[in-house]
Amino acid sequence: MTLDTLNPVSPRRGKCADMHLWRPYTQMKTAPDALPVVSAEGVRLTLADGRELIDGVSSWWTVCHGYRHPHIMTAVKDQLDRLPHVMLGGLTHDPGERLAQRLAELAPGELNHVFFCESGSVSVEIAMKMAVQSWLNRGVKGRTRFVCFRGGYHGDTIATMSVCDPEEGMHALFAGSLPQQIVADLPEDEVSAARFEALLDAHADEIAGIVTEPLVQGAGGMKFHSPQTLQRIRAACDARGLPLILDEIMTGFGRLGTMFACEKAGVVPDIMTVSKALTGGTLPLAAAIASREMFGHFWSDDAGAALMHGPTYMGNPAACAAANASLDLFEGEPRLEQVAAIEAAYERFLPQARDIPGVVDVRWQGAVGVIEMKGLPGLDRLKADFVEAGIWVRPFNKIVYLMPPYVISAEDLEALISATIGVTRTWAGRHFAPR
Ligand SMILES: *Cc1c(COP(=O)(O)O)cnc(C)c1O
């Protein structure tokens, strides 16, 4: 490979010529330039050239109240004026204490103990460490592996890559350097449930816990499973005393119509991870929320039994202030009703996508709308066509999906759905035979 073509004055590259900013999941040599965004308001991004785009993906699923909601802006500014940051080792602060208490009240069952960090991946790592150490603290050795599911996604760090889908996911490349986990198919019917149980029994003494996304596997391809599937997983955990980790990073905070997806199945995990919409897309924050029982495994006179984790920026006060303000908005504004309205609009308009050439499936749940294709050839062109149509939609894998901010107006939502279907139809016509 040569860097000869990394020409700092390449006319095509414009301001990005020097490539100092290395972008996510991006082939820097061939990818189109990133679009510079200068401001945002409500559901709209404003580009440097003055164009406005309706954000159909809520900035990677975070901006649930729309951009720059005044209540969150004020709360963060006030917090910055008083205490932007302080370490949590030996010290504490009101926004963090309050947020932990509110999350404990909001989370189902006895999920009462909140461990903060800065990113979703790290919250899953912490949940995994909790599960492993909970066995060690009870004097049980050898329980170091996790059961995870095909189609799952839990993050980009080493341990979380190991519990992502091993083949279809983005991380197959790294297989050789990851811990070997136990990958199962979701127990979606009697046959797969029996296989799942047999797998658990075959590895009975090595399993530290089971980790899954509840009801929707997001970045693995927006695959849906039933509440019964989740109930089967919970029952299998209960029968064996295994902790269940539910990763609600994508589904949490109303995405599927209830505050947390597991509520739809009446399932309570032993550890729940949250991030993404936690601060309403304002500042990075995540948490692993443990049950009373899980916390109890660390509650001891032995200092060595303490949970051995502590991120530097843990529980950043400004981020906690944003999250507290976001929770105020869930209490004071009709967010879950807005999600129900988005779902109703999908039900009304998304079926129109079913006869697009190359479409395999059209589905929706809560604020998540999905058009699954046979494939996405000419993906860069499709993305550019969405921008041309005034919408920000980011297809991946074989999926064109929508996850707009919950506050989107009926008018903007209809425009977003219809532009998504129209652009996809035109693009698909160039790549797939008519249905
Ligand atoms: C986004 C996501 C993560 C990773 O969160 P980061 O903040 O990107 O590290 C983990 N699990 C699920 C379900 C996610 O959607």
Image (cartoon, rainbow, N blue to C red):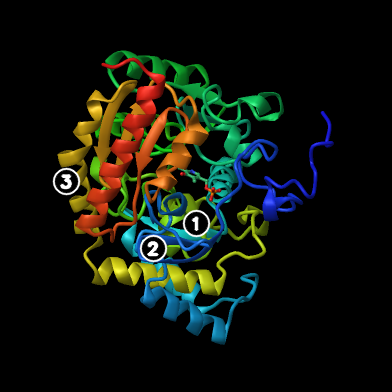
Find numbered disc 3 in the image and state the secondary structure of the residue it sits on: helix
Q: Which residue is mark 1?
A: 287
Please name the amino acid that badge 3 sits on. Ala
Q: Residue furthest bottom?
A: 82
Q: Which residue is mark 3?
A: 344
Mark 1 in CB contact with mark 2 (< 8 angstroms): yes
Q: Which residue is mark 2?
A: 103
Is 322 above or below relative to 299?
A: below
Q: Which mark is residue 38?
A: none
Decide if ligand 1 comes within 8 Å of the CB at mark 2: no
Residue at 58% from the left image edge and 82% from the top image edge: 83
- Percent from the top left, x then y, of residue 241? 43, 35
Decide if ligand 1 comes within 8 Å of the CB at mark 1: no
Q: Nearer the viewer, residue 197 or 212?
A: 212
Q: Nearer the viewer, residue 180 or 357?
A: 357
Residue at 31% from the left image edge and 45% from the top image edge: 261
Mark 2 and mark 3: Cα distance apart in space: 28 Å
Q: Earlier in the sequence, mark 1 or mark 2?
A: 2
- Percent from the top left, x then y, of residue 312? 67, 64
Residue at 30% from the left image edge and 48% from the top image edge: 416
Q: Mark 3, residues whose alpha carbon is within 10 Å: few (<14), some, or many (≥20)?
A: some
